[in-house]
Image: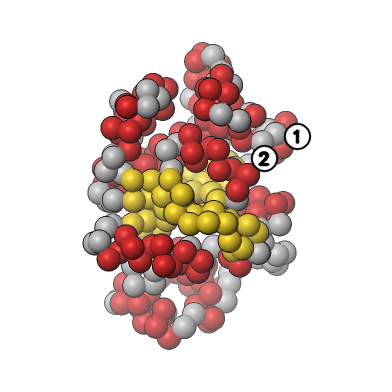
Amino acid sequence: MDETKVTTILPDQSVLDNFLNLIEYKAASSREELEGAYSLVYREYLRRGYVKESSTGLKFSIYNALPDTTTFVAVVDNKVISTATLITDSPLGLPMDEIYHRELETFRRNKKKLCEISMLASDTELFVNGISLMLNSKKMFLIFYLFKTVFDYAIRVLKLDYICITINPKHALTYDFLLFKDLGGLKRYNNANGAPAIGKYLDLNSVENECREKKKEGLYRMFFLKKTPPEKYNCKIKLSEEDLRYFFIEKSDIFKNASPAQMEYIKSCYPSYNLI
């Protein structure tokens, strides 16, 4: 599918507005929203074979314990229907370092500020017969508007240089449309249960000019003419000691299985917490 075909599936604005007006896009602001996001990721990843069955019914990692990690949610009637997590680079690295460390090190050597978008999922039960992202305009715009919220946070709040991501090759056209570039070739990703993955990145310093030069008018309107209100970020949950214990000790063995170096860094992020 080429970019022309992508643009032709966009719905009438009135239909789209009626759908999107029901949804709030923001940073997760409570333990309940975090758990809703982790549960949604688990269900959707299990459906696609990206994770193995787990008694907890949740999918998250040690990176979610970091204070700079931000989980974004699309919420309708207090239910999380879509989510994405932004993980900033740190001494723990990024999840995709597992297979794209050499490529990421090129950015780091040039003193670039990185993040990874991870744990991206939408509730397929909202869409008829699980129609694919590129063939279902409502689902596409749900993802795009959520990504817009993440994008604004990365570029306007964190002032990052690059957004990085690993995707299944079948979604490559979506990210090409969003002006992502290839970071590395096709690999198998243990973090996704051995599924095929392609690394991609978005240059936040040049993407606006590129969008304008390539005359992507719809994309430009969506991503650059309006800014996400600050209150959508200011509500971000600050993990308490109880939250960390709940997710990483009671609900999982993540802290138990973490390396000494990982736990040392986690503890340095929360010097007043007792996480033993």
Q: Residue 261 versus residue 247: which sits nearer the camera?
A: 261
Query: What amino acid is at disc 1?
Result: Asn
Q: Left or right: 89 with respect to 96?
A: left
Can I make out residue 75 in this image? no
Q: Which mark is residue 158?
A: none
Can I make out residue 132 in this image? yes
Cα–Cα span, label 2 and label 1:
8 Å
Q: Residue at x 50, y 69 (%)?
A: 98
Q: Residue 118 versus residue 66: which sits nearer the camera?
A: 118
Q: Residue at x 49, y 80 (%)?
A: 258
Read off the residue under disc 2: 124
Quarter of the image where the N terminus is located? top right
First in sequence, mark 2 or 1: give its number.
2
How many dots with numbers?
Answer: 2
Q: Left or right: 159 with respect to 42?
A: left
- The answer to which quarter of the image holds residue 172 is top right
Q: Position of residue 26 (x, y in %)?
A: 41, 41
Read off the residue under disc 1: 129
Quarter of the image where the C terminus is located? bottom left
- Local packing at callout 1 (Cα closer than 10 Å; few below 14, some 14-19, many 20+) is few
Q: Secondary structure at mark 1?
A: helix
